[in-house]
Image (spheres, rainbow, N blue to C red):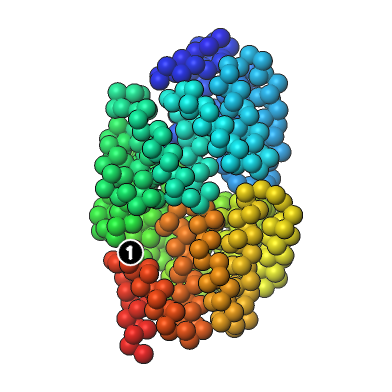
């Protein structure tokens, strides 16, 4: 039977109870709750013929960005295909998008989600899957285009509009449209106070504009808001630590790392990227992070053979290099080079453009050749966006390049790079201090 959700979008379910369970699982996903997968498993045990439940399960497994979950994601796809006869046309498109995603055709998946949203603009699942995957295409134009396409279809009166506004805020922020992004993001947070993506997107606006104290104040929320939120809470801690770092409060930023960001178990891709990028920023200012790098490397060795996401590879390489684990760095580098040269996917192309030169630069820097590291990264720097993630996350490569130029004794280049950075983020205390030190020599 076809059952409408709160936005009047049709979904296939055996009965109303199954439909309610599907919508509850979707809401858990939209709000980053850790019980989304449990809800799906309970639903599918009761009613295995709910196509969208299989699609969402496969998508959650893919969002883990872990190769070990690829077989399970494929099983979810096959289960969705097995019940596709009862699915509506839009749900069959969802199955096609998941298939393209699993096969590494992320641009193909983007096109299918577009087709879904042309047919049904209020399909919030398609909108969310498209937006989150677009975050790893490394294109602010793409994110801006998605925001522009969706906003005309939503108003405050449509249930779930706050979720759409949070995604639009992120797309506008990445394109530098800070004022409009903030207005939309704040409105989204009012409509959907449970949506961490609105909190996150507005935090990006404040970081991008250098409104650091405001950013810290924006992140203050009732403790109950964070319960059961999983990796997204970890990422918001990273944003808090980033605000502290950029104000020059390195001690508190390091304390945030120790109390909240340091992984206690094998790190997932988000925990790894949060931890490695903060430690590298602190090291660039002269803060000794000591054996934190070795501990992070131990929690990340399962990433050595996992080529699920170039964004993860970037932070894995940085971690091994900073931990001075030459064996792990060499093995990971060799595997990335092989992957980049043989796999014809968007991710492999990104690896070729960013991860391979970074691996070369890190190895050079580790053996004391800062000149080679600088020259290698300079050639790749306009490809840095290919690593995916946000502008704030990609800063880590710019900071490492500046550090290499200073270590190579290339003061003119380092000065130009620092001024370029400060032109975009004039309130960044660490970079202002580095430029002051450089000009004092």
Residue 88, relative to residue 284: is it above or below? Answer: above
One can see residue 234 in this view: no
One can see residue 392 in this view: yes
Which residue appears at 46% of the width and 67% of the height? 398
Which residue appears at 45% of the width and 29% of the height? 124
Which one is nearer the viewer's eye here, 41 or 161? 161
Which one is nearer the viewer's eye here, 2 or 237? 2
Residue 144, position in %: x, y? 41, 44
Q: Quadrant of residue 87?
A: top right
Residue 45, position in %: x, y? 63, 21
Q: Quadrant of residue 157?
A: top left
Q: Pointer 1: residues within 10 angstroms few (<14), some, or many (20+)?
A: some
Horizontal arrangement in the rendering, residue 51 relative to residue 401 (left or right): right
Could you tell me which quadrant the N terminus lies in? Answer: top right
- Element class at badge 1: loop
Which residue appears at 50% of the width and 52% of the height? 138
Residue 43, position in %: x, y? 58, 22
Residue 184, relative to residue 79: is it above or below? Answer: below
Which one is nearer the viewer's eye here, 57 or 346? 346
Which residue appears at 45% of the width and 57% of the height? 393
Instruction: Name the residue tied to disc 1.
Output: 425
């Amino acid at each position: 039977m076809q059952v409408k959700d709160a936005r009047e979008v049709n979904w296939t379910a055996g009965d109303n109870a199954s439909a309610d369970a599907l919508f509850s699982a979707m809401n858990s996903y939209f709000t980053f709750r850790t019980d989304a997968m449990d809800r799906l498993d309970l639903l599918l045990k009761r009613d295995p013929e709910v196509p969208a439940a299989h699609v969402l399960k496969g998508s959650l497994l893919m969002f883990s960005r872990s190769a070990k979950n690829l077989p399970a994601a494929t099983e979810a796809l096959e289960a969705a295909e097995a019940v596709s006869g009862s699915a509506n046309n839009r749900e069959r498109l969802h199955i096609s998008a998941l298939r393209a995603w699993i096969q590494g055709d992320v641009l193909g998946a983007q096109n299918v989600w577009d087709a879904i949203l042309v047919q049904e603009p209020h399909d919030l699942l398609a909108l969310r899957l498209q937006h989150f995957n677009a975050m790893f295409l490394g294109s602010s134009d793409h994110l801006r285009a998605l925001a522009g396409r969706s906003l005309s279809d939503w108003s405050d009166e449509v249930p779930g509009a706050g979720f759409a506004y949070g995604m639009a805020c992120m797309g506008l922020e990445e394109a530098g449209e800070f004022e409009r992004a903030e207005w939309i993001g704040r409105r989204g947070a009012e409509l959907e106070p449970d949506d961490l993506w609105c909190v996150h997107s507005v935090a990006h606006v404040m970081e991008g504009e250098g409104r650091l104290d405001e950013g810290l104040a924006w992140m203050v929320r009732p403790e109950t808001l964070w319960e059961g939120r999983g990796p997204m809470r970890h990422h918001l801690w990273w944003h808090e630590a980033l605000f502290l770092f950029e104000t020059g409060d390195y001690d508190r930023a390091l304390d945030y790392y120790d109390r909240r960001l340091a992984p206690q178990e094998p790190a997932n891709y988000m925990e790894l990227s949060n931890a490695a990028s903060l430690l590298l920023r602190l090291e660039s200012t002269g803060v000794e992070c000591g054996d934190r790098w070795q501990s992070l490397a131990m929690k990340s060795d399962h990433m050595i053979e996992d080529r699920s996401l170039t964004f993860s590879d970037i932070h894995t390489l940085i971690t091994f290099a900073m931990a001075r684990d030459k064996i792990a760095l060499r093995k990971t580098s060799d595997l990335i080079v092989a992957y980049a040269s043989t796999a014809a996917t968007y991710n492999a192309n990104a690896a070729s453009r960013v991860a391979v030169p970074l691996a070369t630069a890190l190895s050079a820097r580790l053996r004391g050749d800062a000149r080679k590291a600088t020259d290698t990264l300079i050639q790749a720097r306009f490809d840095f966006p290919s690593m995916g993630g946000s502008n704030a996350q990609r800063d880590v490569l710019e900071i490492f390049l500046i550090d290499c130029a200073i270590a190579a004794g290339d003061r003119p280049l380092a000065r130009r790079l620092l001024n370029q950075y400060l032109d975009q983020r004039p309130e960044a205390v660490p970079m202002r201090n580095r430029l002051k030190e450089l000009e004092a020599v």
